Amino acid sequence: MDEDIEDDSALPHDEKTLLPSTLIYPEQLYLLPLNRRPFFPGMAAPIVIESGIYYEVLKLVAKTEHKCLGLFLTKNEDANIYKIGMGDLHKVGVVARILRIIPMEQGGAQVVLNMEKRVILDKAIKGKYIQAKVHYHDDPPAGKLSKELKAYSISIITTIKELLKLNPLFKEELQIFLGHSDFTEPGRLADFAVALTTASREELQEVLEAFDMGKRIDKALLLLKKELDISKLQSTINQRIEATISKSQREFFLREQLKAIKKELGMEKDDKSIDIEKFEDRLKKRKVPEDVLKVIREEMDKLSSLEMQSAEYGVCRNYIDWLTIVPWGINSKEMHDLKKAEKILEEDHYGLKDIKERILEFIGVGKLTGGVKGSIICLVGPPGVGKTSIGKSVARALNRKFYRFSVGGMRDEAEIKGHRRTYIGAMPGKLIQALKFTETMNPVIMLDEVDKMGASYHGDPASALLEVLDPEQNRDFLDHYLDVRCDLSNVLFIVTANVLDTIPEPLKDRMEILRLSGYIQTEKVEIARKYLVPRNRDAMGLKNSQVTFTDGALSHIINGYAREAGVRSLENHIKKILRKVALKIAKEPKKSAKTIVSDKTLKTYLGKPIFTSDRYYEVNPVGVATGLAWTSMGGATLYIEVVRYPAEKLEMKLTGQAGDVMKESAQIAWTFLQSNSSHYASKTPFFEKSQIHIHIPEGATPKDGPSAGITMVTALLSLLLEVPVLPNLGMTGELTLTGKVLPIGGLKEKLIAARRSKLNVLIFPKENLRDFDELPPFLKKGLEVHFVDTYDEVFKIAFPKEKMHGSTLLARAKAHSPSRA
């Protein structure tokens, strides 16, 4: 209520009936405009008046002795009642007397009015509120009814009774009126009858303005007959529909019945109109290219002419739905705050310095050029190192929407470029679906497991990606379903893979390769302490005060249970421990003290360690050399074992699931050593009357790759010289027939594997020195690393007490080779 209410005795805080002492009607009235329907004399109705100018009028009227105001219908239904004058109102209305005022808590009041007689506007009175001089119309006394009026009255009563049978909506009100009416007042009967119809505001106003009793009752009967016809139509619809439906269909057809009624009355639009309006609303919010807009308009014209029951209607509607749901011209506002981006990357990931620097460079360039465009980043690394989560962090740092889908195992190019619309169940490809989901044209889209795509008779999805991932082509990307050009140049694509070998070269050429190596123990401990333990502890409803992990426990989990390159297995073991702790607390919540997980209590949660050592031998015996290998799961140590046994014919045998490349390496190593045995072991003949067996342990695991050449030669030499290789020595490098050591890949992963196996003397090819210099210092700490160019250098490191004899084969080859200009 307004603050004036305290001084207003006419508006009490509790309900109060206002009964005037004498029925008087003033010569001038305050006017209250009505938008929807007029009121008729003889009615009582509640009206809600909100705080404002008309609420002030109500307070003024409530203070008067007569308690009367005028209710007049506006000429225009949509008129603003706060900005109208007397000229905007119909001349004839009703005078209403206030019966009761009920204040509302939110302001304003609900007022009960009694409509008493017709009133005609004469002259407007100037003032703050709408006020006018009026005169009143009294119906003539009933007296003796003429035959015509009596016939009209009986006809109205008969029609009302028929309505009662068909439409029980106003049954109680009509029965009360019929029970108390003596039918001697045809004017009152006509007013009451039309007030209960669903006639339009204009029709009702005509009845209100009919002072002549004959005309009034005629118009009233006409409106009642219309109402009766509508009710009969409703009854007919009921009978027709109910005759054809079963019990299971009843609910559906009741809704259809309601639609049919509303459609007959013009109260509701059909589904086609609703669809077209929805599409038009979408177009208003988008900046659609001209060529696309032309197609949409043609399809919408086609949709308007199709019948809703036809099969083509559904196809056409779905096509327009997709065309209009693509967020044409809508881009999320990009953020280029480098400090905030760096903070986000540090929050989400530990280490990965090179990757973070590259992403910050990427954002920095976007800041200068006004947006990140035309870049496709490929993150390559073993599982569990954070490739997918880096994509999410990049999207968060750029303030872009993120959408991820996996292309691993995908065999159908339609998944990328969509189906033709002629197919049943056709839909756009994943790229258009991503735009629909993110509702912007510049999201970050991640294509996971791109190295695991397949191909079949349906098509080659890897080839379909060529257009998508080419910055020069994807600005005119053509989806088979949409069949209109779509600009994907603002999309930032991030691709992930475990290995690059299975990615086709043309596709690889379009991407910028960023390698994510595995984590060493120190990094894993920090990741577990900062990210994995807190995140999973919260997820399981535990608090820091209930469970903690010591650094020793985390190190022991890493060494004994989770030695993979990533941290997924480590997280699973942490979850396993936390689940057991949660169960213990749930069983005895009051007795449970704080649980400290240490390396001593670890066995009670995880059992005995899975890995006792990453090495087969603490000290390699004769004929065994330790190599370093790269796999899709990260780095690993690779043992080469060589034995000899008597045989008539000298022969070399290789086992251990070696691939074609490794078989070639073994053959090259054998030939190289056989041709240079006098150089490295002059006093020992080359395996006379012996068969040599080279084995690579873990025979069930396939092994392949060009980096085991020097390891195989070293193992063979160890057996030939009957001297063990230098302890704690690991090596990697391919060998040529002339003794040249060739560079290898995956240096960081191999270095991490060496640290994990506690190999502190390492041999790498000389051409990999550049890669080694780029590694962080903590990876190199405590290692003795040798970079070699020929096998002679390997020999000196692996067998420090042995001596070579004569000049090297490589030197002889250089001396006898023809000179070049």
Image (cartoon, rainbow, N blue to C red):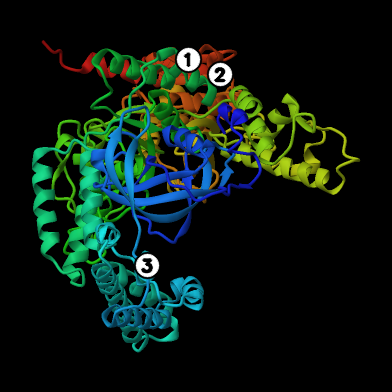
Left or right: where 361 falls relative to 91: right
- Closer to us: 433 or 813: 433
The three-letter amino acid code for the residue at tag 2 is: Val
- Closer to us: 658 or 572: 572
Secondary structure of the residue carrying tag 1 is strand
Secondary structure of the residue carrying tag 2 is strand
The x and y percentages for residue 406 are: 38, 46
Among numbered discs 1 and 3, the one appearing first in the sequence: 3
Q: CA distance from mark 2 to mark 3?
A: 124 Å
The three-letter amino acid code for the residue at tag 1 is: His
Among numbered discs 2 and 3, the one appearing first in the sequence: 3
Secondary structure of the residue carrying tag 3 is loop
Q: CA distance from mark 1 to mark 3?
A: 125 Å
The three-letter amino acid code for the residue at tag 3 is: Pro
Residue 283 vertical position relative to residue 820 in the rendered view, above or below = below
Name the residue located 24 percent from the left edge and 57 percent from the top edge. 202
Residue indicated by mark 1: 786
Which quarter of the figure is the N terminus placed in?
top right
Residue 14 vertical position relative to residue 391 in the rendered view, above or below = below
> Is label 2 or label 3 in front?
3
The answer to whether one can see residue 456 in this image is: no
Name the residue located 27 percent from the left edge and 35 percent from the top edge. 441
The x and y percentages for residue 177 are: 47, 73
Quarter of the image for residue 54 reads: top left
Residue indicated by mark 3: 141
For the residues labelled 1 and 2, say whether their Cβ atoms are less than 8 Å apart: yes
Among numbered discs 1 and 2, the one appearing first in the sequence: 2
> Is label 1 or label 3 in front?
3
